[in-house]
Amino acid sequence: MKGIDISNYQKGINLASLKAQGYEIIFIKATEGITINDDCMMTFYNQAMALKLKIGFYHFLHANDPIAEAKHFISRVKGLHVDCLYMIDGETDPVGISARIRTFSDYLTTQGMPTVLYTGENFYNTEILPIARNIPLWVAKYCSTRPSVKSIAWQYSDSNNLDQDIFDDEILLSGTKSITNVVQPVVPTIRQFPITMTANIENVGIVSSHGNNLCTIGTIGKALRLEMFSMTIDGIDFTYSIHEQSVGDEPMQVEGTALGTIGVSKRIEGIVINVTSIPTGFKLQYRGNIQNLGMSPWVDSGIFVGSKNKSLRLEEIEVQVVKA
């Protein structure tokens, strides 16, 4: 199977064109280290879902506590659709890297997230010790012949600013089959809840975001505050409130109401959403990226996300509808 792996360095890539060229799998960068989130992840994810590409996620490993890095990665991809093993990008900070990879992989495995290790052929041969060598390998070597080292994936080119790969079926999670070689079974359609968000972002202006069952708006790692926010979800009734700089808690408002300000440099510091009606078997969850604190955990209806009177801006809001 042909595939690609992408990050914010490929912002604006035409996935539909690549699918037409026979690319079936897309690995999307989610996180790096213990604080960095790729700001293109959700854009790529929503496009890949719409195109029915096979989706994988990856984390770029650094020399930190590997469990802290693993928890950061999990917090970003938890609840998202995935078809492939979770990739650990291990190609820098060689001192102690084998032990970190092993710990990271073992922790993900305990969470039901089996892994594949991505690294260069030379780095694998010289730096990866036996402790990490039983993890399935995705080898990178830009040449015309697949490396002899045992692997389930091969990155063979980075031409045109695009990492290009060949994947064996072993890259797919158990029960997932190749698109080209297997007739896909008919599965029940999962109910869709279209989500629409609108926000005013510092230095950006008013933007909108749309998604089915999952939607994100705002930025991460750019030090830009959310100043105004509104949201609707087809099929779900709710009220919501924000905590705003110099204003405090705004009164609860019905869905679709614009909360906050535009053009007066006041930050949104927190949000709470109260679900009043939702179809049986589903629940709404949300989280936010908070200045200096990072991404909060997913919370259920009625729980405040953010801070109050600590001068910390809310930079991104994510909302998802999942099975209860």
Image: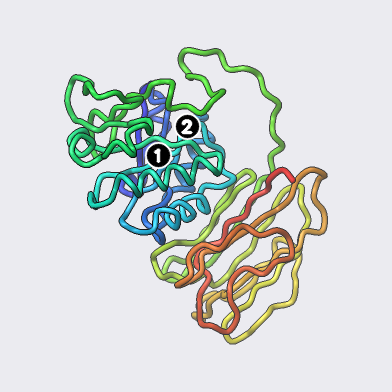
Image position of 289 with respect to 127: above or below: below
Instruction: Please tell me which residue lies in front, 185 or 19.
Output: 185
Residue shown at the point (53%, 80%) measured from the top left: 266
Q: Secondary structure at mark 1?
A: strand
Instruction: Please tell me which residue lies in front, 151 or 42.
Output: 151
Q: Residues within 10 Å of mark 1 (few under 14, many from 20)?
A: many
Inspect the image, locate mark 2, and give the three-letter code of the amino acid beneath it: Cys
Residue extending farthest bottom: 246
Inspect the image, locate mark 1, and give the three-letter code of the amino acid beneath it: Met
Quadrant location of residue 255?
A: bottom right
Residue shown at the point (37%, 42%) measured from the top left: 88
Query: Could you say where residue 78 lies in the image, as x and y percent from the top left?
Result: 56, 47
Query: Could you say where residue 149 lies in the image, as x and y percent from the top left?
Result: 24, 24
Instruction: Please tell me which residue lies in front, 109 or 246.
Output: 109
Q: Which residue is mark 2?
A: 84
Q: Is residue 222 at least partly visible in the picture?
A: yes
Q: Which residue is mark 1?
A: 87
- Cβ–Cβ under 8 Å for marks 2 and 1: yes
Residue extending farthest front: 131
Quarter of the image that includes the N terminus: top left
